[in-house]
Image (spheres, rainbow, N blue to C red):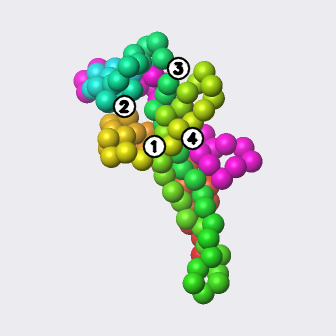
Amino acid sequence: VRGGAFQSVGNCLSGTNSCLSLAVSQTITGTHYRDFKAILTNEEPHSTNYHIGFVAQKNWSISSLGKPYSFLTYSAIIFDRASGTMYKQSSQVLNNNGIVRELSYRYKNQFDRQLGGLSR
């Protein structure tokens, strides 16, 4: 594979305002192997319980005029499959990681549609 590849999964979580996508670590090849090792230096993709992911979340707030509005936020995450724990990451390294960028490219529009996009 030229450049690198990986399989991924993504969907919105039932009963929440969040959507999650994960790179299947065991399928990571090529340049994405370096992207994986840049984040999880002590892990090997083919034998780990950790997965790099991308989350979209719909939030609500009140404007200065007192009107409710929604907005979407996006985060890079590390998911520990063994414990079921998700760690939200905001480091420059992870946010610019090739795996996170690829997950965003694959799922952002789908998640925006499923979450209902922005409202005023």
Q: Which mark is residue 39?
A: 2
- Which element type, helix, strand or loop, lies under badge 3? loop
| Crowding at mark 3 (Cα within 10 Å: few <14, some 14-19, many 20+) | some
Q: Which mark is residue 20?
A: 4
Q: Which residue is mark 3?
A: 49
Give amino acid for label 4: Leu
- Which element type, helix, strand or loop, lies under badge 2? helix
Q: Which mark is residue 6?
A: none
Give amino acid for label 1: Gln
Picture quadrant of residue 101: top left
Q: Which residue is mark 1?
A: 89
Give amino acid for label 3: Asn
- Which element type, helix, strand or loop, lies under badge 1? strand
Q: Is label 2 in contact with label 1 (beta carbons under 8 Å)?
A: yes
Give amino acid for label 2: Ile
Question: Alpha-carbon distance for marks 3 and 4?
Answer: 17 Å
Of pointers 2 and 3, the one earlier in the residue sequence = 2
Question: Alpha-carbon distance for marks 4 and 2?
Answer: 19 Å
Q: Position of residue 86 (x, y in %)?
A: 57, 36
Q: Position of residue 88 (x, y in %)?
A: 51, 43
Q: Nearer the viewer, mark 1 or mark 4?
A: 1
Q: Position of residue 87 (x, y in %)?
A: 53, 38
Q: Position of residue 73 (x, y in %)?
A: 51, 57
